[in-house]
Image (spheres, coloured by chain):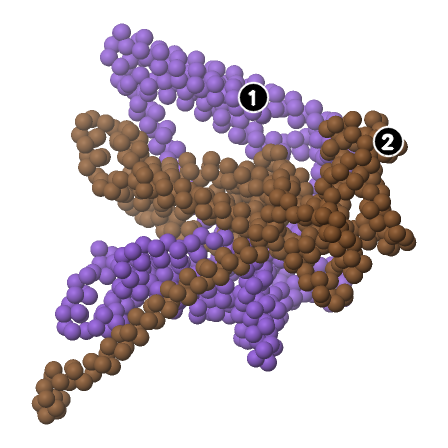
Chain colours: A purple, B brown
Amino acid sequence: MNIGFFAALILLTATSYLLGRKKAVRVSAYGRLHSRPNYYGAYVALWCLLPAALVAVLWIALEPWLLTHLIVRELPESYSGLPPDRLGLVLNDIKNLATGAMVSGEPDEALRAAADHYRSLKSLGSAAVAVGCLSLAVAGLAWGVRKVQPTLRARNQVERVVRAILIVSSTLAIFTTVGIVLSVLFEAVRFFRMVPPWEFFFGLKWSPQIAIRADQVGASGAFGMIPVFTGTLLISAIAMGLAVPVGLFSAVYLSEYASRPVRAVVKPLLEILAGVPTVVYGFFAALTVGPTIRQVGERLGLEVASESALAAGLVMGIMIIPFISSLSDDVINAVPQDLRDGSLALGATRAETIRQVVLPAALPGIMGGVLLGVSRAIGETMIVVMAAGLSANLTMNPLQAVTTVTVQIVTLLVGDQEFDSPKTLAAFALGLVLFIVTLCLNVVALVVVRRYREQYE
Amino acid sequence: MAEDRRLERDGGIAAAVQRTLARRYRAERRFRLFGMIAVAVGLLFLAVLFTAIVSKGYTAFQQTYVLLDVYVDPDVVHVGNLDSADYQGLIKTSLRELFPDVKGRRDKRNLYKLVSSGAGAVLRRMVLEDTSLIGRRLRIWVPADDDVDMVIKGHVDRTLPESQRRLDDQSLAWVEVLERQNRLEKKWNFTFFTAGDSREPELAGIWGATVGSFYTLMITLLLSFPLGAAAAIYLEEFAPRNRWTDVIEVNINNLAAVPSIVFGLLGLAVFLNFFGLPRSSPLVGGLVLTLMTLPTIIIAARAALQSVPPSIRDAALAVGASKMQTVFHHVLPLALPGMLTGTIIGMARALGETAPLLMVGMVAFIVDIPRGLTDAATVLPVQIYLWADSPERAFVEKTSAAIIVLLAFLIVMNAAAVFLRNRYERRW
């Protein structure tokens, strides 16, 4: 399975296209072709490529499992009797030995033998499958060419395959969602078997770090998500407190007051803010905004934590400004001009028109945008990872350090993971909460926005 | 009625309007002012963000070098040990020659700290290239240590009390001697663009992360563009309007708004734990980013297909083209610029994405330049995150410089998208 194999397969496919096309042109002497010659070429090429590619993909998917199975059967009793997790380590060593990478400790004879066995199996299997696939491709080619006749409905057949590919691609989004739900749910259920759900959803204390070792003093660990969630809401509230007024007012100004050239310059400039990667905002928050707020606070005689919720929230707000402003801009522009004209004709000033006619008409759309913004703030990760704290304080004071759901997921999952400890699994439970909350916000927002659009279109 | 009578008494409606007009105009001006303030605040943030990054980062494109007279001692380096000779020792000897009156182990160790621990590698490279250098006395520029670099660049105030500086008084005196002898110079920092990561700021570069980003984005582009385009074509051109396609549509819109970190969880659980793909590899990173950008690309591609007028389709169908031929020969070429624009914007987002990649282990400290899709690698934004966490002062400017590079890439990509849109997209 290497570049050479794939190159050969592609070459064969190209050849089969040409052969099919040529044969079609040749047989056209015996009767009018049903389709254009290209379709006969494509027809043969599909016969050549699809079966071979299918086998190759199957092999790539099954190879690790199959090889592992064969190796374990050959291992001496002292290894194959090990519990699964230890066995996994041994297998890892064998694979590393086979590829010539570093191995922890001195490998013994049995491992070396297994590694040699592994290597020979692997190369043998790959070679066999490669030869098999290529012969399959040649056979497909021959079969396809043989079937090329003027009466063959090549176009319909090719189109059917293309259509199937299109359909499969479009269902990928469903599979992604299902994958997300299943993977998160599966681990979360394992978590809830160790930690009761009510403790997780209503607990007031969060300190997952002490539950690393079972024999540790106070090893129980606390998995109450209330403080973590409060921190998320606090930071999101600060962010929306900045982003909604600034975003909304700039949208109103740009769509109702600004002249065309001003709008043409300012709007893209504001949208740059949306394109800045979040890690940059995180760095900005941690290095510039955080210390500044701290200094100002100290001058005012306030006690400000160095990783205050305020810093993270404000920078997150900056990030969301363009999001709110461009969504609001769209909805404000979608409000029919008649409504404005009517209001202005009655003698209302522009501000009165906007406040009493345009904004109420655009309100559902704006609300949808704000909800999407909230969902984004809750799910935002890098800013809070870099600028918010780790300790889960249950507080509403924006000058203190709080932690968020995303920060906890990152800290729990970066580095060594053990998938049997509640510490690691807790991240998936938090992920589930995050997914459900953002899902609800998104669905409500999308429905609101959609219904509003239908109203005026 | 009472109101009417009051108006009558006060001189009619016009007068009533007149009376409140000043207040209403004030409100109007105030409202307008708020709008201007909001726009100004947004632009101010943009300006502050960019000045903060650029002013911190531009100095990292230069690096302080020290001029040393190094004697390539044939006793230390000979043909037999070219690879493994103690080149750093030669550098140390030349430092001792520069400051012959430094005695004592601790002082000497401090003295050695003036140049980077990578200085020996510079010498090694030169000798490996040209073995005739052995036995000669060379004048070479080697990178200075990051603490010296910070002093030379003025990031550290020399007048601070000793306890608040990383460089002590004695080292500072040596630095000043070197300066007077013109042995310190700021040069263009090639290392930054050609090296992988390093614990030593003066040896750290972004090339490793750039290559990692490149591989990751290659995977993302190769998978997400064909899949996204195919999905959009099916949904827009072929799919019947029924409950099932409605579900798909809602699903795609919703996936576009799912937090990126959730895709990281998916990648961790499915690609790493279930399929056992290699951790930290561009392959897995690319797969995760594919799933993340796919909804964006599908939405953009559908919009592009929608903007092709139905008359094109009708004309093709009328002359006998099949549905498939109509789409692939006539609609798709017209929609392609719009699709590509959306794809580039999706790629730009993927390039800046960090959180999901942390979940699939692309956050390791990796010195080597990745050489394949399954090598351990990191990407530019993750490199920025890692450097931002490092305590050394010198990493602050490295981080900012890496951000400048990342933003430059993003600006180029977005400019390409705008260009594509203006050049090829047709308004019907």
Q: Amino acid at mark 2?
A: Pro
What kind of element bears circle 2? loop
Q: Is residue B41 above or below residue B340?
A: below
What kind of element bears circle 1? helix
Label 2 crowding class (10 Å Cα cut-off): few <14, some 14-19, many 20+? few
Left or right: B164 in relation to A431: right
Image location (x, y in percent) of residue B233: 33, 38
Residue A189, labelled with which disc? none
Q: Chain of mark 1?
A: A
User: Which residue is denoted by mark 1 in the rendering?
Assistant: A4
Q: Is residue B294 above or below residue A153?
A: below
* Residue A132 vs residue A385, the one in the foreground: A385
Image location (x, y in percent) of residue A252: 31, 65
- The reply to whether discs 1 and 2 touch (Cβ–Cβ < 8 Å) is no
* Residue A367 vs residue A66, the one in the foreground: A367
Q: Quadrant of residue A423?
A: bottom right
User: Which residue is denoted by mark 2 in the rendering?
Assistant: B74
Q: Residue at x 39, y 43 (%)?
A: B417
Label 1 crowding class (10 Å Cα cut-off): few <14, some 14-19, many 20+? few
Image location (x, y in percent) of residue A295: 59, 72
